[in-house]
Amino acid sequence: MNSFSASKPGSDDWRTISLVGLAHGTSHFFHLLLVPMFPLFGREFGLSWTELGLFVTLFYGVSGVGQAASGFLVDRVGARPVLWAALGAFTLAALAAASAQGPWGLALAAALAGLGNAPFHPADFSILNQRVATPRLGHAYAVHGVSGNLGWALTPVFLVGLWQASGSWRLAYLGMALVALAVLLTLVLQGRWLETPPVAPRRPGADGALAFLRLPALWLAFSFFLLGTAALAAVQSFAAPALASLHQVPVERLALLVTLYMLAGALGMVLGGFWVARTQQRLERRIAWALLLAALLLLAATLPGLAWSLALALVVAAGLGTGLAGPSRDLLVKQATPPGATGRVVGTVYSGLDIGFALGAPLAGAAMDAGQPRGVLWLAAAGLLLALLAAQAVAWFTSRSAPPRPAG
């Protein structure tokens, strides 16, 4: 039982889980601050696919560096004030996008959004690990993952829908700013359910604040996130135009691809939460089966002669596979985390997410510019298969470093 939940009923856990889920969903909502408008920005500002992909690189580059640093900040001052500041940065990012007059304005919006995104994983997991009872952690991680996928799924619908309804993409971005402000107000008013104590700094030496950096499992987990999210970045940013080019259909028919992919991933995470609730053993095997399924489905979607609707269905089904792996992935990281170092470890490991996005999007954009749309999904499948291998290595090193069980 965790420190905050030892004497509290399950309803208190679910209040915390719901609020953290809301915050995490908002962070993913802002991951796609610019992506749904890429075709518009390309026409309006004369940008290539590769140049548009660099905005994604900037967002995740800022977020990755900031996430590694923010883990230490979360451990020092607690997670709650860091979350509040992050939502303020999202508000500024949306306002910068609304007032952008060219590429530099979009770059400012991407950088501010990346700064806002940086603290979410160390803050979220610090709150969940300290406030939620251990039997409910599998479900907590599932809700956390589902909320993120729902945030991704809602952005294209919200942003493009508001743009079409209002006739102005700038008004659509003002709407996004209001979303961030509303979530910030909610978390301030309900802040008691997010409170965590700072972690007392350790004395310098072998067990100092940076000792966790010597753990092989940590860097393998980092590479797992980097590879898996490079795959996601390729799908999220360019799968729709890639499939449209491969199967000779207007890209408008595939406008909801990212939304459907993320909804399938959310369903997979719900199922994955029940999967790990049964047992928390052999997590790496579950990750392997789920990611192998997703990779094969992505490869199948590139086969010549497929109907575009079947190719769309295959990519969406791949989202279900990656979602299934989500709760097992987060528990695998928890098992590899030394006591008292959640913020630092999560900040470092999950910065692999940001670097993966930063690398994956421009690589996929370059494949599109080179006239190789099939390469977008091949890149995604390769990333998933390499992530699969990294998860097996994380589990192996974690088991070797675990203390031996008592006899009997």
Image (spheres, rainbow, N blue to C red):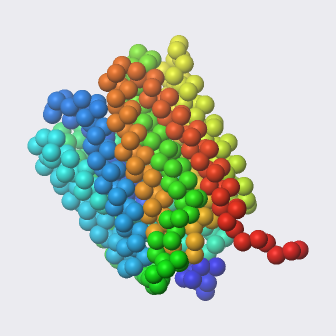
Question: Of 63 and 1, which appears nearest the observer?
Answer: 63
Residue at x-position 25% and y-position 50%:
110
Question: Residue 46, how many percent across, how many down?
Answer: 16, 30
Question: Residue 4, how many percent across, how many down?
Answer: 54, 82
Residue at x-position 41% and y-position 39%:
360
Whether 337 is drawn above or below 362: the answer is below
Is residue 345 at least partly visible in the picture?
yes
Extreme residue in the right direction: 408
Extreme residue in the front direction: 205
Residue at x-position 13% and y-position 49%:
99
Extreme residue in the left direction: 101
Q: Quadrant of the N terminus?
A: bottom right
Res. 169 image quadrant: top left
- Judge from the rendering whether residue 26 lies leftward or rightward of residue 328; answer left or right: left
Whether 196 is drawn above or below 177: the answer is below
**Number of numbered callouts drawn:** 0
Res. 57 image quadrant: top left
Question: Residue 221, how many percent across, how many down?
Answer: 55, 55
Question: Of 205 and 34, which appears nearest the observer?
Answer: 205
Question: Of 81 and 364, which appears nearest the observer?
Answer: 364
Whether 335 is drawn above or below 406: the answer is above
Residue at x-position 59% and y-position 55%:
329
- Judge from the rendering whether residue 138 lies leftward or rightward of residue 62; answer left or right: right
Q: Quadrant of the C terminus?
A: bottom right
Question: Residue 407, how many percent across, how many down?
Answer: 86, 74
Is residue 171 at least partly visible in the picture?
no
